[in-house]
Image: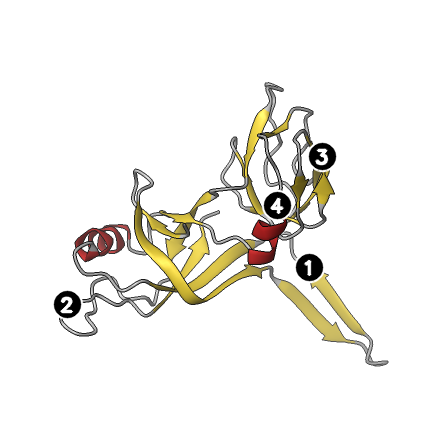
Amino acid sequence: MYGVLSDSEAILAKFTAPLSVSSEEPTQSGDSLSLKRHVVRMPAQRWKIEAHLEPLSHGANELMALLVTKGNHSPIKISVPQNYGATQANTVTSLIEVSSIHVTGSSSVYGVFQGTLPAGTFIKFNNHKKLYMVTETVSGSGTINLYPGLRSSVPGSSGAPIGVNFEEVIVDFLYEDAQLKGMQYSDGILMSMGSVTFLEDL
């Protein structure tokens, strides 16, 4: 179930369509005199979620309190929507663990698991908060290619195995600056927030 969570990770409001998850990565581009395009990618990257929230009645008070107190300055826990095709193709039947050390900047890790982990699956390592996407399908234990590159080493200096979350991926996001920090009722009973935007908290 994807949506906005409380601090205790209970669902407060589910996402509804239309919904989009997009990657924001700064780039600079320009054309030479021969009209060849030159593009420079910056190393920074974050995920952006735009979605509608289910209209609420009796549970609207908790969502309102969360949005007002967190505002755009404190992170909100989000259960990240997975690509539908990826969820249908996912046949992983065990925990995914990474034990060998992969340094910051690496674009892949070696995972031990059973089943097929499809391209397009969002994952999160237990030892840091960044959200990653699997870029190539891998079956059984093998190399998991990631986007973006690791922002922290995995599994870390201790070398202890680190679990990989892929079923319920909970990540901290910030509420977009321009969004309403209160309540809006569509018919006097149902609170409807309309379209909301969340930016990954880096």
Which amino acid lies under the numbered mark 2 shown in the image of this protein? Ile
> What label does residue 189 carry, if any?
2
Against 139, residue 31 (above or below) is below
Local secondary structure at mark 1: strand
Q: Which residue is under mark 4?
A: 90
Q: Are marks 2 and 1 in contact (CB under 8 Å)?
A: no
Image location of residue 62, percent across then percent down: 20, 51
Q: Residue at x 72, y 74 (%)?
A: 30
C-alpha distance separating marks 3 and 1: 33 Å
Q: Is residue 186 left or right of residue 172?
A: left
User: Can the viewer see residue 17 in this picture?
Assistant: yes
Q: Nearer the viewer, mark 4 or mark 2?
A: 4
Local secondary structure at mark 2: loop
C-alpha distance separating marks 2 and 3: 50 Å
C-alpha distance separating marks 1 and 4: 31 Å
> What label does residue 140 carry, if any?
3
Against 71, residue 123 (above or below) is above
Local secondary structure at mark 4: loop
Which amino acid lies under the numbered mark 1 shown in the image of this protein? Arg
Against 195, residue 132 (above or below) is above
Work out whether mark 3 precedes mark 4 in sequence or the reverse, and give the earlier one: 4
